Image: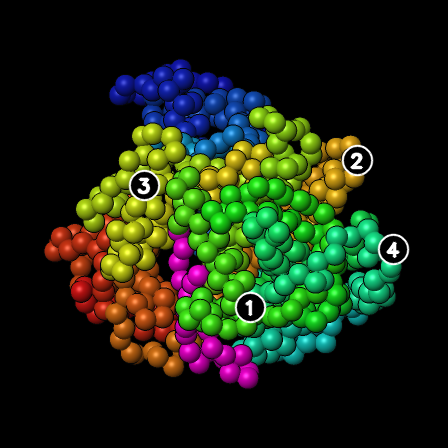
Amino acid sequence: MVKKRKINKAKRGGAPVPIEIRREKIMALLKREPTLNHSFRDLCNAGGGIDNGGKEDTWFIIEQLLKEGFAEMGRRNRFRLNKESLATMVGRVTMQPTGNMYVSVEGVEEDIFVENENGGHALDGDLVKMAIIRTRRGGRMEGSIVEIVERNKARYVGLIEVGSSYAFVKSDSRKMPYDIYVKFTRDTPAVENGQKVVVEVDDWDINSKNPTGRIVDVLGWAGDNDTEMHAILAEFGLPYGFDREVEQEANAINGTISEKEYARRRDFRNVTTFTIDPDDAKDFDDALSVRRTEDGLWEVGVHIADVTHYVRPGSIVDCEAVERATSVYLVDRTIPMLPERLSNELCSLRPGEEKLCFSAVFTMNDNAEIIDRWFGRTVILSDRRFTYGEAQQIIETGHGEFSTEILKLNELAQILRKERFAAGAMALERDEVRFELDEKGKPIGVRFKVFKESNQLIEEFMLLANRNVAEFVGKKGRKASGRTFVYRIHDKPNEEKLTKFSDFIVKFGYQIKSDKPGTVAKEINRLMKKIKGRAEENVISILAVRAMAKAVYSTDNIGHYGLAFPYYTHFTSPIRRYPDMMVHRLLADYLAGEPSPEKAVYEKLCTHSTEQEIKAAEAERASIRYKMVEFMEDKVGQEFDGHISGMTDWGIYVELDDTRIEGMIAMRDMIDDFYRFDDKSYEIIGQRSGRRYMLGDGVRIRVKQTDLRHRQIDFEMVAKL
């Protein structure tokens, strides 16, 4: 304890500092530097010096602050802030590569910045209690972590450096800037120096320099294609295989169709039916049937694999599907939601095989107006499997097998498409990058997936089925039915993001009117037509997508803004999406007259499905980035033309024109001037030359280096085009 000192009121020259002001200054120092241990002299000087009784006043103030709990004593009679005395908040950590972090707190608009030294050994994803230690100019708060409320049991992928009885894992993730210490035990799997492993962080003791963890899987040697793809899946907490018990239960499912099952289903085996899918598709979960009715109308059936006939609620396979929630599509492989026995055999609508389906059947006239609709379980027999390319050739030439049926369906689909856009649907399509891979998975070429009329044919009828199923369940007369259901919802654009987008496109001479409800989608579509084929098309398309809200699953329907549908769901892909399985079960119950089930259960499943969908999309993008880097490895030193696709405080992102491969020019490498990022004008500006770089600008770059481990490509600026 600090010894009490008698306050000496004698003053020694100069103006005395009032004790209240001295106290405020000392408290300000402790708040400003909360992690430092301050000596008595530091505090005395901060308060105004030792003259005029400053020494005695400082001792008195220290005693008060210790009693009040504002300060605490460290070693060697030094003092620091007791962070527990400050206002605290609880939030979730997002780690930065530097070790600094941001904490998101519910109800607080801006994430709160925490410096590395104030991190309290928190890691990415941890739930923490944080003291607010200062508020910077502009009102931005800064915090210091005082307690780990809940440690995120995260898994990290990285290279292992093996010692005699321990190892360190250097994580590939930029969200883990520390090496992870692993002590070998009997349970540690056999591992060799330089292999890639998955490690789970257990703890980070306050007295340790590194977090500690344990090895949960050895993936193999870095650079091997399977190792790297499994590493991406592990990074996002996604599985790369099925447990034996899941496979065993799936393999034991009886695929025989009984006479009783035939009798309770509508029979489409004698109606012309076919599938249209990508060249490399392995499972076919949707088929179309079409026939002319006696009264001159068209009956179009949208037939979806009846997965829920085979997968019962609560079964091992169903529980696994709940957990996965979606199939995952990496560059070179698919990680299915359901085992192969279901996805590629029983539920795959292969030609020449009788298959059980859940169907939406529409009676339409030549103007694509729906005269009648029917939902229920069916049995089909697909006559033909078409690829998109084969169907497109029939559409373009008018010749080929089932040409009459395909041409009629395409005619109806184009009418539906035209009506959809007239109603306010958004057209934000962008060519998808596809890699040509050799037998070892190494990329040897880049191509683009082109979205043609054959793709649109399938898309429009899938949208028709999804919309009508949602309307049938969710709408009763002119009002919502109130029945529990799983909707695919999409909110209107965020006004702030839309304003930034509008301000940006003005620089290219474009504008959109967003002051009236319902006009934004039509204005965006009009803009997309204007920029088609122009240099700025790509960057404006990217920013338009970023300005939009993200679609999610929910039991609360708000409609789908992007599609301009007041009711929408996912009914058409139960092989690869669990929400579709939920929709099938709910629709079957309502058709049978069953009551509405508990809403909260389905809402929880909706939230989980959305989260898994986001993870799967991130993993897909990570696999694409990996292949991009791998493709550019032998092109270091070569020059390419591209356009600026993004910018930040630390660099300029450039997307190459011929391949859509993206890399970054680090600001520190632009040595011809001192550049800064202006986030208001969204430009990079040279301080001396006034040279400006903005989104969409054409540039010529040189490939500086590639980093497979972190999936990064570094460019150098050659010239502005």
Label 4: few (<14), some (14–19) or many (≥20) C-alpha neighbours in 10 Å: few
The disc, 1 or 2, on the residue closer to the chain's N-terminal end is 1
Q: Which label belongs to residue 260? A: 4
Q: Nearer the viewer, residue 380 or 290?
A: 290
Q: Is residue 531 visible?
A: yes
In this rendering, which labeled residue sits more in front, label 1 or label 2?
1
Instruction: Give the left or right position of residue 535, taking residue 475 as reference.
Output: left
Secondary structure type for disc 4: helix
Colour pattern:
rainbow
* Residue displayed at 25% across by 46% down: 505
Secondary structure type for disc 1: loop
Q: Amino acid under label 2? A: Glu
Q: Which residue is mark 2?
A: 594
Per the model, the C-alpha gap separating discs 3 and 2 is: 44 Å
Q: Nearer the viewer, residue 436 or 253?
A: 253
| On-image quarter of the N terminus | top right
Q: Which residue is mark 1?
A: 402
Q: Position of residue 609 (x, y in %)?
A: 64, 48
Vertical placement of 334 versus 416: above or below?
A: below
Secondary structure type for disc 3: helix
Q: In the rendered structure, which segment of residues is drawn in magenta?
A: 428-453
Label 1: few (<14), some (14–19) or many (≥20) C-alpha neighbours in 10 Å: some
* Residue displayed at 18% across by 65% down: 721
Tell me if label 4 and label 3 are in contact, CB under 8 Å.
no
